[in-house]
Amino acid sequence: MQVQSRYIGIACPSCGAEKTINIPETLFTEKKFGHVKIQVPKGAVCQEHVFVVLLDIKGRILGYQTVDLSVSTPDAARSKEEAQAEVDESLGLMKFIKLLGFRCLAGLIHAKLFNYQPYVIIKKDVQMDMDEVNFFLDDVVPEMFRNHKALKHIEYNDYVFPTATYFYALVKNQRKAAFLMNLHKHIIQMPWQTGLDLEKGFIATALKNKDPIEQLKYLSFYITKFLEDVDKTKIIIEPMKKISKKDLVKKLKEIAITSTVTKEYVTSIKEFIHRRDSRDIAKKIHD
Ligand SMILES: [Zn+2]
């Protein structure tokens, strides 16, 4: 007999890597209520992390849990170099990745820059320090974006709505243009088409720095550099009627020499102009 299975798109909560994995249907049909927990081994979605994905009995993702393996390594068994290379994960960018998940953090940065209202759906009686997250977001963006599109929360009462995905569907319907996430590191609604590669790149590159203060500085630096490239693009296209993405990549490469200018990067610039400046100017850039 052929085993029925379904494909589910999963993202690593620690590094944002995404992959579609195959899950046997029996996992869901055997359950009548509650949720399904699947441990995703190293190598299945990304090469570095083990994590747990939580699904409801219909196979819809509810969220993720990270599995910390480093605590199982006894101190004595580690070399001096390994101990020094260990990053303090309670500080810098790692702190917010651990709290929010990699993709949700990237999404919050996108929402702030591209002008979308972000909400986190939090179960009743669960506490979250919203100020801390908003201070951090304000800290990494230039002044003109501060105190703007701050993260707000929506309370979720699981007594009134025993099925979380039903409640999520209601919120989505009420706030079609909002970025929605939950505290289980899961993006519930991403109202834009351009994905998260730009912000994921900012975070991943900033993380190459082990010093937590330097991480924030670098994140801020890459964001500022992107905004400068937006300004450079506006100057390039100002006298033009239209320009192809390919030609814009070429022109931008000549003047933005420290940036990695790709077609995707230019797509993000176009989206930024569309959201922040003018649809007509953005339309000048075409495929
Ligand atoms: Zn990972």
Image (spheres, rainbow, N blue to C red):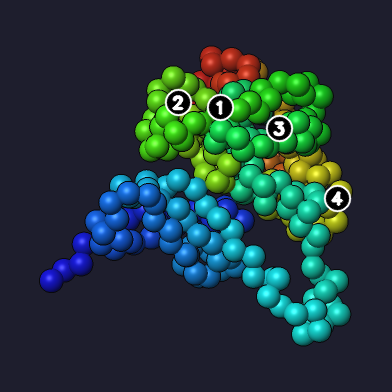
What is the secondary structure assignment of the residue under circle 1? strand
Q: What residue is at 62 percent from the left and 49 percent from the top?
A: 102
Please say whether residue 156 is visible from this viewpoint: yes
Q: Position of residue 143 (x, y in %)?
A: 82, 24
Label 3 crowd bin: few (<14), some (14–19), many (20+), radius 10 Å? few
Of the pair 138 and 236, the residue shown nearer to us: 138
Q: Residue furthest left?
A: 1
- Give the residue type at disc 2: Val
Of the pair 82 and 32, the residue shown nearer to us: 32
- The residue pinned by badge 1 equals 154
What is the secondary structure assignment of the residue under circle 4? helix
Of the pair 136 and 247, the residue shown nearer to us: 136
- The residue pinned by badge 4 equals 214
Q: What residue is at 54 percent from the left and 36 percent from the top?
A: 123
Q: Are circles 1 and 4 on residues that touch, CB within 8 Å?
A: no
What is the secondary structure assignment of the residue under circle 3? helix
Which of disc 1 and disc 2 is earlier in sequence?
A: 1
Which of disc 4 and disc 2 is earlier in sequence?
A: 2
- The residue pinned by badge 2 equals 171
